[in-house]
Image: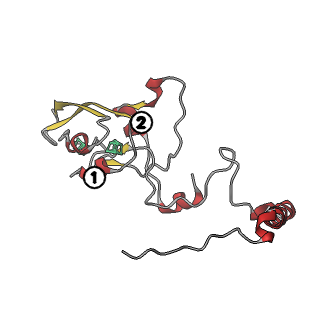
Amino acid sequence: MGVKVVERHGNTFKEKLYLPAIFSGMRSTLKHFTKNLSDASNIPTICYPEEKPTDITPRYRGVHRLTHRKEDDSIACVACFMCATACPANCIEIVATPREDGIDEKMPAIFNIDLLECVFCGYCVEACPCDAIRMDSGIYSVIGELREDFIYNKAKLLSIKGISKEEYSLGK
Ligand code: SF4
Ligand code: SF4
């Protein structure tokens, strides 16, 4: 087996001094500092949460929502448990109940998502055969003081609206 000798760097007098490299780094830092000082629009970071991101794409996975049927605005979920089965974090809790209005066989009596355990993988959305759960809410930050604040129940998930592509681009 052949041995490849790799040349060591940093052996010259200039490199051993370290000062040229230090000054080069400082020059680069100073250049960007003065550039940003003269024109703040150059800075790629934003002052979140006062400023909202404006480059969220429609594929961004935000907080979940449960969708409504177009026909009668009732819940689209049929409590098939596909999303809960697909969920790798096991953070979806569903309790099914018979649907009395004849529209479908079942609906969820309880539908909870624990957002502290959710890893926002989107598998639940992929698994749903009814397009009943989506992550197109455009909500990218969830705030709460108690653990319960992060468990979104059926009413909460149904109340969240989806946002259009135009709204995504506005970062609402
Ligand atoms: S996004 Fe992933 S982890 Fe979160 S509820 Fe859906 S399947 Fe579970
Ligand atoms: S959200 Fe979709 S996958 Fe989950 S229980 Fe309802 S219908 Fe089934």
Q: Is residue 57 left or right of residue 20?
A: left
Quadrant in the picture for the N terminus? bottom left
Q: Nearer the viewer, residue 125 or 1?
A: 1
Above or below residue 22? Residue 66 is above
Q: Position of residue 32 (x, y in %)?
A: 80, 64
Q: Position of residue 8 (x, y in %)?
A: 62, 70
What number is the disc on residue 115?
2
Q: Is residue 127 left or right of residue 153?
A: left
Q: Nearer the viewer, residue 31 or 170?
A: 31
- Label 1 or label 2, whichever lies nearer to me, is 2
For the residues labelled 1 and 2, the Cα–Cα distance comes to: 20 Å
Q: Residues within 10 Å of mark 2 (few under 14, many from 20)?
A: some
What number is the disc on residue 131?
1
Above or below residue 118? Residue 169 is below
Q: Quadrant of residue 26?
A: bottom right
> Element at badge 2?
loop
Q: Is mark 2 within 8 Å of ligand 1?
A: yes
Q: Is mark 1 within 8 Å of ligand 2?
A: yes
Above or below residue 86? Residue 45 is below
Q: Position of residue 113 (x, y in %)?
A: 35, 35
